[in-house]
Structures are given as C-alpha cells and as structure tokens.
C-alpha cells in the first residue's frame, strides 16, 4: 500500500509539473541544489545570472529590430542559509538587480537603467526522499516560502498608460520587464527530482 501511494503521488506530481508555467522560482538560487545535497550548518554566498534580450519575435518568428532595442539584465543574489540537518534547511535570498535598456517610445528613444534591490525571498527546503546506489542517485526535494515585496514597482505604472502611436515602432520592452519588484507577497512552492 505505501508503495502504491508513493507511485500515485509521483505520477500526479509529474503531470502537474508538465502543466506548470515558468515563474520567478526559476530565478531563485538554491544553495543546497547547487551542492547536490543538504549539509548541516551555515552557508552564504552570491550567485549571478545575466540575460540579454535583443531579438524581437511575433507569433514565434524573429522580426526586424530597426531601433536596436535591447534589455540587459544582471541579477546578483546574496544568500544566507542554514541547514538544520541533512534533510531540512532555510535560506534568505536578497537579489540586487541591474537592468540597462533601449527602446522606442513613440518616435523617440528611451534609454536608461534600473538598479536596486528586488523582492527578497525566505525559503524552506526539505528533502522528502533520497536513494543512492553505486549506479544512481535520486533526490526528491520540496521548496516553499514567501517572496516579499521589497523591490521598487514604479515601472509597473507604465502598463496602465501605454499608448500606441500610429506609424511609430512597437516596443518589445515594457514596464513589467523593467520593474525591480512585484508589489505583492507571493507564495513559492516547487519540487525537484
């Protein structure tokens, strides 16, 4: 019976995982995941992610970018974690964001930067199951926590006031792309195998 329950739960999770959309949790650095296992004690450090957007698409096909619009984004996460034991840990992530962009705004060009602290996250990590043999290792880890609204949300206001100017090039970079924060408290729940 326990084996059947585990198998049914596992299949349900796989089905849900296929249907889940990408979200901010992809950008959260998990120290225990990088090490491949949980360790008791403190861990601290930084992780950096750089992304460049300079290709425009419409209906999945690349289109011309005559204005040379781009968005360069660097996310540096400072983290402090504590492993209670080999299966349970907590971690605080503080992201520092630097965004540089150029985009059309009507017939003019808007060029600038957005810099600051993003939304801080407090996470709990739990290793549900681990099986290790000479030939393979299987880990099932669950992550849960809160993302707190500490990042500046001023750029989100642009979403309410966007106006298309007839004949002007369309911008592929909007306020939600430039904002440093979400403005809301968000729950985080995910798992990985």
Image (cartoon, grey):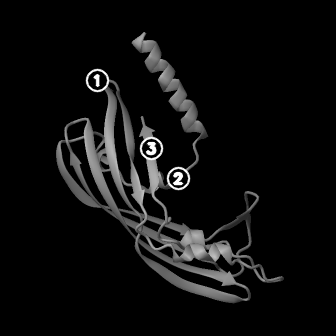
The label nearer to you, 3 versus 2, is: 3
Q: Residues within 10 Å of mark 2 (few under 14, many from 20)?
A: few
Q: Nearer the viewer, mark 1 or mark 2?
A: 2
Q: Quadrant of residue 67?
A: bottom right
**Residue corresponding to mark 2:** 23
Q: Secondary structure at mark 1?
A: loop
- Residue under circle 3? 189
Image quarter in which the C terminus is found = top left
Q: Residue placed farthest to the top in the image?
A: 1
> Looking at the image, do the residues carrying marks 1 and 2 touch, with CB atoms under 8 Å apart?
no
Left or right position of 29 against 73? left
**Mark 3 residue crowding within 10 angstroms, few (<14) / some (14–19) / many (20+):** few
Depicted 166 relative to depicted 132: above or below: below
Instruction: First in sequence, mark 1 or 2: give its number.
Output: 2
The disc, 3 or 2, on the residue closer to the chain's N-terminal end is 2
Res. 71 image quadrant = bottom right
- Counting from the top left corner in percent of width and height, residue 61 is at 74, 60
Where residue 133 appears, as percent x and y from the top left, is 29, 23
- Whether residue 19 is situated above or below residue 28 in the rendered picture: above
Q: Residue, x 70% and y 75% (percent of image)?
A: 65
Quadrant for residue 12, please give it.
top right
Question: What residue is shown with label 1?
Answer: 134
Q: Residue at x 29, y 52 (%)?
A: 91
């Amino acid at each position: 019976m326990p084996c059947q329950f585990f198998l049914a739960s596992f299949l349900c999770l796989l089905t849900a995982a296929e249907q889940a959309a990408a979200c901010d949790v992809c950008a959260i650095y998990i120290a225990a995941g990088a090490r491949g296992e949980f360790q008791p004690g403190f861990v601290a450090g930084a992780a950096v992610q750089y992304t460049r957007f300079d290709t425009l698409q419409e209906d999945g096909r690349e289109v011309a970018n005559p204005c040379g619009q781009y968005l360069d984004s660097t996310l540096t996460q400072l983290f402090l974690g504590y492993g209670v034991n080999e299966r349970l840990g907590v971690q605080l992530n503080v992201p520092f964001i630097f965004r540089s962009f150029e985009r059309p705004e009507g017939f003019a060009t808007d060029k600038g930067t957005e810099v600051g602290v993003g939304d801080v996250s407090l996470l709990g990590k739990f290793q549900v199951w681990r099986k290790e043999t000479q030939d393979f290792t299987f880990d099932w880890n669950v992550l849960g926590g809160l993302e707190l609204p500490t990042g500046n949300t001023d750029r989100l206001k642009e979403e309410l006031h966007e106006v298309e100017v007839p004949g002007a090039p369309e911008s592929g970079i909007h306020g939600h792309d430039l904002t440093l924060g979400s403005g809301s408290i968000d729950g985080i729940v995910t798992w990985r195998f």
